[in-house]
Amino acid sequence: MAVRSGLHPPLALASLPEPTRAAPAAPTLLARAALATARAGERAAWFPDRRGRFSASAWPVSPRNGTPVLARVALPEPQPWFRAPRPNPLEAQESPRLRGVIEDAQTGQPVTGARILADGHVRAISEEGRFQLPFPRDGGAVQVKALHYRAAEVLVPAGEDREVTVRLEPFTPRGVYLTFYGIGDREIRTRTLELVERTELNTLIIDVKGDRGFISYKSEVPLAQAIGATRITTFRDVEVLLPTLRAQGIYTIARIVTFKDPVLAAARPEWAVLDERTGEPWIDNEGLAWVDPFRSEVWAYVIAVAKEAAEKGFDEIQFDYIRFPTDGRIQHALYSRPPDLPERMGAINGFLAEAAAVLKPLGVFLAADVFGYTLWRTDDTGIGQRIEDMARHLDVLSPMVYPSSYHLGIPGYRYSVAHPYEIVYHSLVRGRERLRGSPVRIRPWLQDFRDYAFDRRRYTPQDVLAQTRASAEAVGADGWMLWNPRARYSAEALAPKPGEAEVAPAPETADRAEDDGRLTWLQE
């Protein structure tokens, strides 16, 4: 039996003879060459195919970062000397069954909340991590996913019922963000991917639908094409880079800006938040228009973009700006319904429920960004975000716990920018207490940029390290993500991967990527 990393056959099949098969050489040089090509934004002729035939049996982990990549097991073909009793004609019409259990490879405990993808459907598992599902007699593949575990795939040959034990390798996401323009800029992209390759980082957040309404790759969503959302594309090699990152054990997140969309507002003004004084689309302090969170047409468009991103291979969909606007003359903003508290919460949670119904059957995980103050305030913070309600539809809640964004401080720490550890730690503990009993994970955004609200201080690597330590102590394996609008991260705050020297900081030079203006703070 050919066993791949993370998967172990049941004892009942252990005595079957091993198929004779020459193991291919580990493609370390090829994999590194593909990643180097992808860094440069060029199209590579070689990248791992969906079945991973090139090297999986000889290469169970990523050669650079030591993290398990997609694990596979090939169940054995039926042997000529082993035959099950001949079934009667009625039984012969039934499909074979694939049975098994999903376990944590480190602890041996059942993995709850895992998803099994077979025949285009997501199958449920029991609380004990067990599953059973019908399978075509001609065989095929079953993919097993669980949040914060490396995915695994079971290749089932044609034949009778099968059993398998799937052991998933856990990991703690530690990520950085590549902007809409950064993913297409050769210097910025190369710098970021090298940082991921050499440090503890294992997660990459990439703009799919940015703050200005454009989609970073050539979208096939008809409305996106009709309104000009694909007029500027920066992620032209998405079909090459995503499989390459997956082969390197890197978790990929598609960031999708939800209700801040000047392109859609201009093309469909009847769907926009309007200015009651002019009847034109309402404009925020950045000069950008928003679309109405109450409009079902807006929901359908954003979900279509997210579905396409999931189908392209992103592991997770992360909705940002999933709220009502806060900055600008909001007293003049006009919606299709009165924006009272119940209505606001209904719009945000209604969208999330609809998105979950479409996206989760695809096996992708669902996340949403929220203000840091939502962890403290029990109302909707005036923007439709109440964490207890949002968590019902999400796998991950990502609060932006930037110390600079706490302009009123928190109890005991009024001047928040001077207390990065305390702000992050106490905010996350507060959120975890409120969500006790919920399966949702809390993976925060952390500040790796200059202060904009207090004294304009530069956040040092020590400040960044204080935040990552606070996150680890507050929410543990839920992980963290660093935000810098120019993708210039504090390398000194990141631990090197085994065998790597400490990473030198990047020189202070101007980038061609734009500051996308996300660094706003909550107005009360």
Image (cartoon, rainbow, N blue to C red):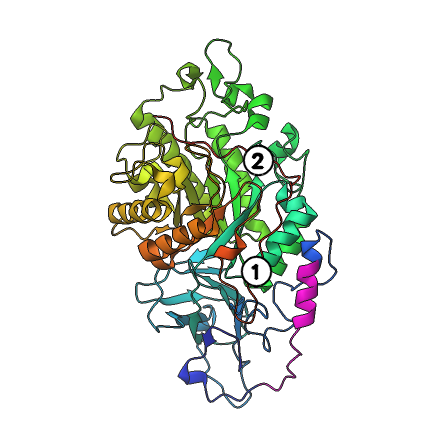
Please provide the residue range marked out in magenta.
Answer: 19-36
Q: Is residue 320 above or below residue 189?
A: above
Q: Is residue 388 left or right of residue 317?
A: left
Front in this rendered view, residue 49 or 108: 108
Residue in the image at 49% along x and 58% along y: 494
What kind of element bears circle 2?
A: loop
User: Residue 343, percent across and down?
Assistant: 33, 26
User: Residue 281, percent across and down?
Assistant: 52, 18
Residue in the image at 37% along x and 42% along y: 418
Quadrant including the C terminus? top left
Type of amino acid under label 2: Asp
Type of amino acid under label 1: Val
Tag 2 residue: 515
Tag 1 residue: 503
Q: Quadrant of residue 384?
A: top left
| Proximity of marks 1 and 2: CB atoms separated by less than 8 Å | no
